[in-house]
Amino acid sequence: KQEVTQIPAALSVPEGENLVLNCSFTDSAIYNLQWFRQDPGKGLTSLLLIQSSQREQTSGRLNASLDKSSGRSTLYIAASQPGDSATYLCAVRPSAGNTGKLIFGQGTTLQVKP
Amino acid sequence: DTGVSQDPRHKITKRGQNVTFRCDPISEHNRLYWYRQTLGQGPEFLTYFQNEAQLEKSRLLSDRFSAERPKGSFSTLEIQRTEQGDSAMYLCASSELAGMGLLVYEQYFGPGTRLTVT
């Protein structure tokens, strides 16, 4: 059974700091991994999607890496800003069983202090 | 196109009542997904459609839950005889149809419907 874990559960950093969020998954049989941002009481905003054949994806100050064999992904945020404060979720799409679902971690809640 | 939309955004109901939520996906997206999210947790998959066909249902989708996508466009999720444990955010997402063995497209989420059962 695929399980996704995110560590730490919460993180507080001063503005301007570079930071790394971690995501691990137990089964390497995945099609892709997606990182999302969620503001309190809101829906999910897709940040980056990494296909299983890819090692990393970049968008602006965000860089996501994928090491499928070890079951790990990281989301790197450069020069953090208060507007980055939110919960960050990672999700994998298993390749076993022809499923369409995403399996999510519990998220890391980030606070960037001015 | 403005993205995935959901209606209503908030619903408060009394235990035992039936509720129905609507999701309108991005217009060219063939796949539509429903998830449930409780406070402090990541979303959990409920079901998904490819066009009008419901292809997968989670064990979380008890007999009180039913989802439809009659014309392959919008979808409805109905909960009958609501219980306090049904209180959650119900999220809808859509994606393009994945190619055969090719890239698998990302899922785009709507704003969610917050259900409170009193």
Image (tube, coloured by chain):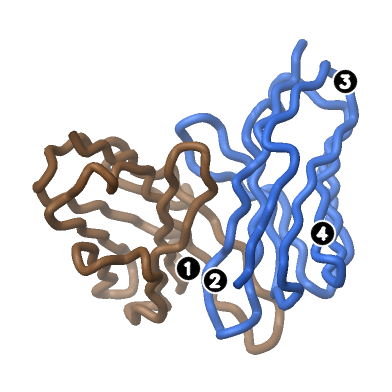
Chain colours: A blue, B brown
Residue drawn at x 56%, y 84% as measured from the top left: A98
Instruction: Decide if residue A38 is on the left or right side of residue B46.
Output: right
Instruction: Decide if residue B55 is on the left or right side of residue B101.
Output: left
Asked if labels 4 and 1 touch by Cβ distance under 8 angstroms, the answer is no
Image quadrant holding the C terminus of chain B, namely top left
Residue denoted by label 4: A72
Total labels drawn: 4
Q: Residues within 10 Å of mark 4 (few under 14, many from 20)?
A: some
Q: Nearer the viewer, mark 2 or mark 3?
A: 3
Residue sitting at the far left: B17
Which amino acid, mark 2? Answer: Glu
Residue drawn at x 21%, y 59% as measured from the top left: B78
Dot 3 falls on a residue whose secondary structure is loop
Q: Give the distance between the C-alpha atoms of the residues marked 1 and 3, in whole angstroms.
A: 39 Å
Residue denoted by label 2: B96
Co-location on one chain, circles 2 and 3: no
Q: Residues within 10 Å of mark 1 (few under 14, many from 20)?
A: few
Co-location on one chain, circles 1 and 4: no
Co-location on one chain, circles 2 and 4: no
Asked if labels 2 and 1 touch by Cβ distance under 8 angstroms, the answer is yes
Asked if labels 4 and 2 touch by Cβ distance under 8 angstroms, the answer is no
The chain containing the residue under callout 4 comes to A
Residue denoted by label 3: A16
Q: Nearer the viewer, mark 3 or mark 4?
A: 4
3 or 4: tag closer to the N-terminus: 3
Which amino acid, mark 3? Answer: Gly
The chain containing the residue under callout 3 comes to A
The chain containing the residue under callout 2 comes to B
